Amino acid sequence: MNLESFWVVSWVNSIGFLSGLPEWCYAAISLLCIFFFVLIPSLVFIVFFDRKLSADLQARVGPNRAGPAGVLQPIADLLKLLQKDTRSPWGWIESLWISIHSMVLYSSLAVIPLGSLALLLDTEMSAFLPFWSALVLALGTILLGLSQGTVAGWFGGIRVAAQALSGAFPALISLLCTGVRAGGFRWTVLAGSQGFAPWSWTVASNPFQAIAFLVFVMSGLVLLGIAPLEGGQSMSDIHGGVATHLSGRRLVLFRFGRFYGFFCWSVISVVLFLGAWNLPLQFRELLVRAELYPLIGFFELVCLLMKTFCLMMVIVWIARVNPRSRVDQITDFTWKVLSPFSLSALVGAGIWAGWRAFL
Amino acid sequence: MTIVLKKMNSIDESVENNLTQWEIGPYHSSLPAPIKLSLLMDGEVVSHCSLETGFLHRGLEKVFELHSWRSSIAYVDHLDPEAAVFGELALCLGVEEIAGLAVPSRAQHIRIILAELTRVSSHLIYMVRMARVVGSETIIHYLLRDRERILDLFELLAGARFSLNFLRFGGVCADVTEGFIERVLEVCEVIRIRLKEYNDLFTFNHGFLKRTAFVAPLTSSLIRECGVTGPNARASGFSFDVRKDSPYTGYDQVDFDVPLGRGEGGSLGDVHDRFLIRLREISQSMEILKQLSETVPSGEYINSEVEKGYAIPSGEAYVRVESSRGLLGCHVVSDGSSQPARIQFRTPTVAHLMVIPKLVTGIRIEDLPVLLASLDLGIAEADR
């Protein structure tokens, strides 16, 4: 972990008696900081805008009671759900599910790229690490469905499994496309190969990368089960399937897990294809000259999050106006359409990169 | 294989045959109404289905016999709460036939306007249920917004939005309010524009076509076997509409078409056809409303013979009307007393329920909610 460059370290060290803590303490503090100051506010922000946008699209008002224009509605919902008592005590399968969920959350927080301010881990394998989290998250959801002991839950679990497997393949292949262009899978390498201007983004560099971008976003939606491709999770015949029996706090955990998957996937899509956290060059130089290094990190984070929110809103928009697809149609689509496209994008991107190298 | 399936009752047998047993209902998100389905599934394909109904039985036909003739109009509203006017209309026509009551033509016009508005509102609710099962949220709100306009019209006319209790033996309860006809025309125009919007957003949406085309086509042999009528039968090309074949209450003076299914999306009579036929019927109803609104005659709105304490002579009548779901028959028997001797209904939903076990067999379990919603079950009128 490149904790040295992380502002938390100097910040903690500045509190006299805390200096010289073991490394894992710094890591834990950093994760908690990211969780509480980036993830939770993003959740609140996205939930509010999702509801307002949906309401606008659907010719209704949307939340408008809690706080001005209803901005406090997500917090009100969260507090309401948290104080609800659970119907039955935790069983061991539910405990297993919850521990997998938490493991995923905290392990992948360290690897999600949030600009230089919060880039905890940057290795040659960085871009692949959130994948395993996504798969483990899917495993948790499968277990949640199977542990219900009902036909609906069982169907839900099996469908989530089929969907996650079919989504993972094209997603991995299209991820390789970006590595071919950038020459590595470090977050910094992937971000460094792009610029602030849209024409310097990976997605605009050649048609194959554009295909790879579309495949990557869509297969991520399939892998994580996000609307409009969430057939495995919420077909009406299985009554919500895996999450039918959840309420109160458990529902918060489940929803938060799904939101986290959606958020991570959007962040990664932005870093891989949409210019990452790059700021305009002159602006960055200005800040460097003024030696405002923490501010650079802050602006990078803001830039990244803005793009991420825009991407998420576009997906929400598409989900709101389209019917939900049947789960077998989704898996058909990923295996028969997305996978061939991702493979041809990889071949094309490889040829393109080779041709550019000869020039 | 099917014989084996029908015999199978115990869990052990289903395990031996590697089939899953699943009982859905009476209350479940995939069901449009309280019914209970016992399914046997081979993987995700339904291999056998049996149906249980009667969860909404209220003894409605017995209630008629216990109250006065006049009260039966209020009770018949509960035959099908989503399309209350058709029950009222059938009952009034029956009683008028027994008593030989003439209905003033102004009242007939008002009745048809009400019936067609009800048909549109009922079809809009049908589309809402279809949109809900395929998970398309936006169109639900659009449809409900437009249905509100029709309910507003009902409120303007009868003071109630649902159970109108507006028709009377020999006419209607009150004359139309000032500005009502203009507002009907206005609503017609709005809905005519919106229909195009619905088509763009939903009807020919690729995702919607994928969910509905080729799913559970209703064959003409099944239609004859079970007595399916209304839009469901017409979607399979079965041309039968009571309004055309034996016109009542002045439908013979109106010029309109009976749309038939053509199997554009997939095969003839599939779920998509059943959906499309409702859209087309809405536009035909708009035509009827326009024609009638422009030619409402002046005069009385109720036969002046009918006063308080008017006695229905003894006799018997069977009348048929075309409700939004199909052929609604009403058998009225009067023994000359102040209460009906018997009022019995032949409701279209009963036939649609009979079709379910046959249609469900062989489809994927994900299509079950879509199929059930597409049949437009008014369980209140079937269980009554």
Image (tube, helix red, strand yellow):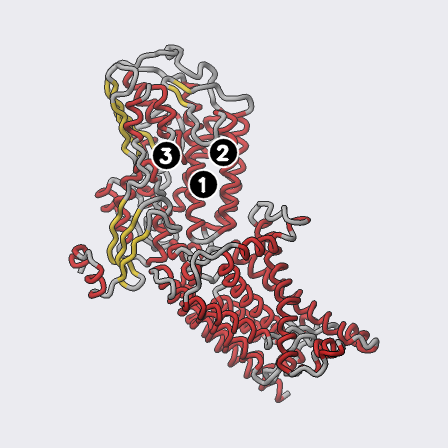
> Which residue position is annotated with label 2?
B150
Q: Are marks 2 and 1 in contact (CB under 8 Å)?
A: yes
Would you place residue A194 above or below residue B180 in this image? below
Residue A174 image point, x, y percent: 52, 76
Q: Quadrant of residue B96?
A: top left
The 10 Å Cα crowd at callout 2, few under 14, some 14 to 19, many 20 or more, is: many
| Identity, as a three-letter code, of the amino acid under mark 1 | Leu
Amino acid found under the numbered disc labelled 3: Asp
Residue at image position (62%, 59%) is: A44
The residue pinned by badge 1 equals B124
Label 3: few (<14), some (14–19) or many (≥20) C-alpha neighbours in 10 Å: some
Residue B136 in picture, x, y percent from top left: 48, 52
Instruction: Label 1: state its secondary structure.
Output: helix
Position of A270 with respect to B177 (left or right) is: right
Q: Which element type, helix, strand or loop, lies under badge 2?
A: helix
Q: CA distance from mark 3 to mark 1?
A: 15 Å
Which is more N-terminal, label 1 or label 3?
3
Q: Earlier in the sequence, mark 3 or mark 2?
A: 3
Q: Residue at x 42, y 40 (%)?
A: B123
Q: Are marks 2 and 1 on the same chain?
A: yes
Q: Which residue is mark 3?
A: B80
